[in-house]
Image: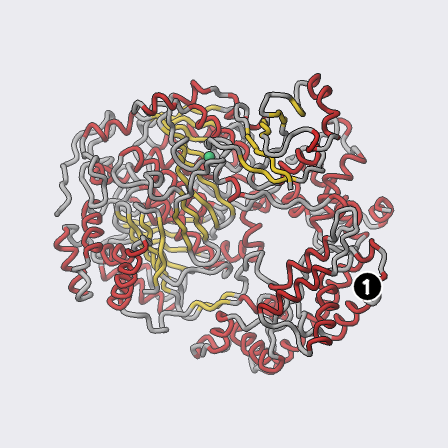
Amino acid sequence: MTEVVADQTPPILKGPSDKEKKYDRQLRLWGGQGQQALENAHILLVNSGSGVVGIETLKNLVLPGIGKFTILDTGIVSETDLGVNFFLDEDCLGQPRAEACTALLRELNPDVEGEGHLLEKDGLSGYLQDHHLYTLILFSYPIDPTSVSHIEEYGRKHRIPLVSMHSAGFYSYFRIVLPGSFPIVDTHPDSTATTDLRLLNPWPELSQFAAGLTKDIDSLDAHAHGHIPYIAILLHYLKIWKDENGSFPSTYKEKTLFREKVSSAMRKDTPEGGEENFEEATAAVLKTVSVPALPGSVKEVFDYEPAEIDADSNFWIIAKAVKAFYAQHNQLPLPGSVPDMKAQSTTYVQLQNIYKAKARQDVAEVIEMVRTHPHGKGIDAGEVETFCKNAAFIKLIRGPDASPRSLGEIARKEFQSDEEAAAWGGPVSLFPIYLALRATSHESSTRVADILSEVDASIPDVASNEHLKKVVEEVARAQGGELHNISSLTGGMTSQEVIKIITKQYIPIDNTCVFDGITSRAQIFRT
Amino acid sequence: MSPSAVVPGELGSGAAPSRWSFRDKILLSTGPFTHEMFEPSEEAVAALGEMQILVIGAGGLGCEILKNLALSGFKKIHVIDMDTIDVSNLNRQFLFRHSDVGKSKAEVAAKFVEKRVKGVSITPHNCRIQDKDEDFYLQFNSIICGLDSIEARRWINATLVNMVDEEQLQEGISDSLKPLIDGGTEGFKGQSRVILPTMTSCIECQLDMHAPRAAVPLCTLATIPRQPEHCIEWAHIIAWDQEKPFPDVDNKLDNDDPEHITWLYQKALARAQEFNISGVTYSMTQGVVKNIIPAIASTNAIIAASCCNEAFKLATTSNPSLGDGENNYMMYSGNEGIYTYTFKHEQKEDCPVCGQKAKDLTVDPEWTLQEFIESLAGRADAQLKKPSVRTAEGKSLYMQSPESLELKTRPNLEKKLRDLVENGHELAVTDPAFATVSFRFAIHYR
Ligand SMILES: [Zn+2]
C-alpha cells in the first residue's frame, strides 16, 4: 500500500540549503521569519569602558547571522584589553579597538557585514544623524552623560530599542528601553500549556461527531472502545453528568467526582488491565473541563490604549477585532490544534479537521471585523490567523510611558522583603547591585565613600542599608574592571533578549536584569 | 571597611604587567563576601596558572569554556572530544570556520585559543572520554563538562566518584577529589552545577531532573499513526529494518548521510499521505532521527561563563562558589523573560553512584526478568539501556556479555521475577555505559 502511494505521487524533495544547514539548530527555535528579521537588522554598538560585555553580546549576534553591525569606540587597544577581550590579539596593540574587534568578529560569519570606527571625542552625534540606520543600539557603561543623551534622543526620534550594559567585577546588569508598547504574538508558550478544547461548550459539529463515536459505548468491541479519543469520552460523560446534575462539574470536588466516574468507566478486562484512552481522559479532566478564563496578559492587551502612533498598526487593529470577538462570544477564537491522543488514525484526523474548520470560521469572523477598520483592508489574512491561533498567549510589554516606580520606591520595597526573607533564609535582593553600578555610570570614582554618596544623592535614605554597603565595597574592589566570565555571561543574556526583540518571538524582560556572579542569580526589575 | 587593595605587580612570564590588571584587582584584594581563609597574594595568582583543568567537550559549550578559562588566567588546559566539525556547528561554535569542517574539534579549538591568548597551553585529546583511565583524570585539579550526551556525563561522574580515596579524604588529603562542573543547554534554557564527588549531590543523584522523553508505543507507529513524528519514527524503526535499503553499508543507518535521511523522509512522507497526516518535512525527519536539540550561541555563552565563573571562584576562593555548601545548582530559563533558580540539590543516600543504600524499587512480581530489564530503560531515575543483572549473592541472572554467558543466562528472561529474587532482596545491575558502577536495587513486590 505504502509503495503504491509513493510511486503515484513521488514527494517533491527539498533538501536543506547551505544556509539552512548552517543555521539548523536556531531555525528550530525562531524559524525562517525570525531568521529573516535578524538578517534585516543593523545593530550599533557604542562601546565604552573596557567594553568586553558589548563585544561578547555582538559575538552572539554575529554567529546567528545578524545582517550588519557597527562599532563605535574611542578606545585604543592596550595590554589590559588583551587580558579580557577575546576578539583582540597582540597584533592589535595600539590600533583603534573598534576596527580591531570588527575584523575578528567578522571572521565568525562571512554572511555578516560589519564596520568599526574610532570615535573622536564628541564625535558620536555625527554618527547619529537624521537618517534611520540602526535597528537597535547597544551601549556599555561607564560612558559620558552626553553620549547617553545623544543615544536616547536617537532612540526616541527613530523609535528603536536601546540596550545599556554594565559589567564590573562579579556584578553586572543590562537594561532595555523599548520605544513604545511592544506586543508579541508568537510567544512560544510551553508545550504543557493547555489548549482550549471547548469541552463545556462544544459546537454542533463537534458534539455530533463525538456522539457518533460514543453512541453504543457499552456495547462497543474492545478495539473500538479502547480507541475512542478522550475528547469524545469526556464529552460523553459530561453530557451524562449534566443530565443527572443539571449542570457541568465546576468545583474542584465535583471535578474530582467526575474524574472518578470517567475512570470507573474504563474496562479492566483487557490484556493490559486498563485502557490508555480512558487513562488519558482521566488525566485530562482537571485541565480541560473548564471554561478558560481570559488570561491576565490578554486582558492587559484588551484594556490597553495604544499611543496614537501605534493605534493603526496591524497588531492593534487585529487586537481590537479579537476583543470585539471576545465581547460577542465570551471566548477567544479557537486555536484549532488538538493534542495527540490515543485514537484510530482516521478518527484523529477527522477530529483535527473539525477543530481546524471551527478555527477557520472564527478567523473569518475576525477578518471581517478587521476589514471594517479604515486601515484594515491591506492586512494579510495569514497575520490574522497567526494572531487568532496564539490569542490566549499574546503578551504586551509596556513602553517607557507607563509610569515606572521611582528607584527609591523599588529599593524600599526590596529592603522590606529582604527583612522578611531573612526570617526563612530566602535569597537577598539584587537591587543594591543595580544601585551601586548605576552610581558608577560615568567613570566617576570607585571609592566606597564616593559611590555611597552618589547613591545617596540620587536616592535619599537607602545608602544606610547594610547590604547595599557591602555591595558597594565589592563594586569598589573591582575598580571598574571587567571579569571576562561575567561579561561573557551578561553578553549571553543581553543577546538572548536582543534576539527576542528583533524576531518579536518569545518574551523579553521588562526591563532591567541584574546578575550576581557571587551567588549565581539573576533578578528582573522594572526601572 | 574599605577593600585592602594590593598594587598588582609583575605576574607570570611573558605577559606584560598590566594584561591581567582587571582580574588581579579582584585577586589581590579582599571583598566583603570572601571567606575569611582567603588571602590575597601574588603566590595565589601564580598558583592559578599552575592548575591543570580538563574540559570535556569542544562543542558549543566547550568553545566558550576554553575561551573563558584562558581569559581567567588558567594556563594548563586539556580538552577532550572525539567529534569532527560539522557545518551545523558554525552558528555557535565560534572557534571553527567553514574550512575546518571535517577536522577534529579538540585540535582546532585548542590551536585557535593558544594562538589568540598568548601564554596558555591547551592539549587536545581527539578521543572518547572512556578511552582514558583514572591516571589520566587524576592529573587535573578540576573538570568542566560541556556535553550534550547524558551517557557521557554519567560515565565521567561515576568515574570521578569512584576515584575518591575515602581514607585519604578522612586524613584531610583531597588530591583524589576532583570537582566536576557541568553545564547543559537546550534552546533558551540551561543549567550549571558544581559537584564535589562523594561530598555533594552528583549527576546520578540529579538524574530524574533530566527525564527521557516518553517513547511512542510501537503499536501506534505500526498501526495508528496520528502525528508526522509517528510516521518518521515508523520509517526509522520499522521500515528501515524491513526494507534494508542500503545493503552496501550493511544497512547501518548513518544519521549524517543525507541519502539515508532522504530515504527516511520519503518513506515517512508516503506514510503520512496514506493516513492524511500533514507536516512531515526533511528538517523534522532529521530532528526526530538525530534527536536534535536546538542550540544557540547566546545560551551557550551564559552557561559556559557560569561554569567558568564557578571554576574561577573555586580555584581562587576570591568569592563563595556553588558547591561551597549553600547551593550547587543554577537553572536558567530565557523563554519568558529571564528566570534563574539557584538551589541546593540534596545528595541521595540511595544514589547508585555516590550513596550507601540500595534504591528501593517496587515492581510487579508477575513480571518476567525481560520486562523488568526493559523497565530500567524508561525509569527517569535509572535510564539503563543495556543492563546485566546479578543477585546480591553474585549469581548472574542475565548478562549482556560475554556471548557464552549471555546464551547461558538468556532462558532466565522468560522467568517470573518472583521465582528469581525474594521480596526485599537486592539486585545488582551493571551497564557497559558505566563500566565500574554497580547499581543496587532493593526489590519490593507490589
Ligand atoms: Zn549521587
Q: Horizontal placement of B160 versus A14: left or right?
A: left
* Nearer to us in this view, B375 or A381: B375
Residue B359 visible in image: yes
Q: Identify residue for label 1.
A: A217
Residue B368 placed where, x, y %? 72, 34
* Nearer to us in this view, A100 or A274: A274
Which chain does tag 1 point to? A
Image: B423 above or below A267: above
Secondary structure at badge 1 equals helix
The three-letter amino acid code for the residue at tag 1 is Ile
Residue displayed at 81% across by 35% down? B243
Q: If the image is split into quadrants, where does the C terminus of chain A sit?
A: bottom left
Residue B264 placed where, x, y %? 73, 41
Image: B379 above or below A239: above
Residue displayed at 74% across by 72% down? A240
Residue B107 visible in image: no
Pointer 1 local density, CA inside 10 Å: few below 14, some 14–19, many at least 20: some
Residue displayed at 80% across by 35% down? B242
